[in-house]
Amino acid sequence: MIIGTALIVLTWVLFTGLGLPVWLGVIFTVLGAFIILFGLTFSIYIFNLDMKLTSALFPLFQKHYDKIKRDQHL
């Protein structure tokens, strides 16, 4: 959320600082934020970063779930 807000603010400052009309700055800001966020999510998808993060955190998850008391024993 903070990254998205920062991207929107930075693109807004960039496009309004160029002396563009406000409506054009809004359009460029929305398009710029969309392109940046699409690029980030696309790179996460291409490099499979979500599953790499999950596999790195798996031992921590496993340790937590092994400590949970169970009512049923298989």
Image (tube, rainbow, N blue to C red):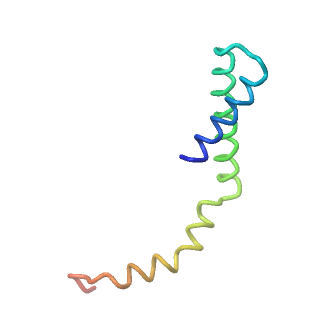
Q: Nearer the viewer, residue 8 or 34?
A: 8
Q: Which residue occupies 74% across, 30% down? A: 14
Q: Nearer the viewer, residue 27 or 14?
A: 14
- Specify the quadrant that holds the C terminus: bottom left
Q: Position of residue 42 (x, y in %)?
A: 67, 46
Q: Which residue, as the protein is rendered here, is positioned at the far left?
A: 71
Q: Nearer the viewer, residue 30 or 71?
A: 30
Q: Is residue 4 above or below residue 67?
A: above
Indicate the quadrant where residue 33 lies.
top right
Q: Which residue occupies 71% across, 23% down? A: 16
Q: Position of residue 43 (x, y in %)?
A: 70, 50
Q: Is residue 63 above or below residue 3?
A: below
Q: Position of residue 35 (x, y in %)?
A: 69, 35
Q: Which residue occupies 25% across, 82% down? A: 70
Q: Which residue, as the protein is rendered here, is positioned at the far right?
A: 18
Q: Is residue 45 above or below residue 4?
A: below
Q: Position of residue 26 (x, y in %)?
A: 63, 21
Q: Which residue occupies 66% across, 59% down? A: 48
Q: Nearer the viewer, residue 29 or 19?
A: 19
* Residue 25 appears left or right of 18: left
Q: How many marks?
A: 0
Q: Is residue 58 above or below residue 42?
A: below
Indicate the quadrant where residue 36 lies.
top right
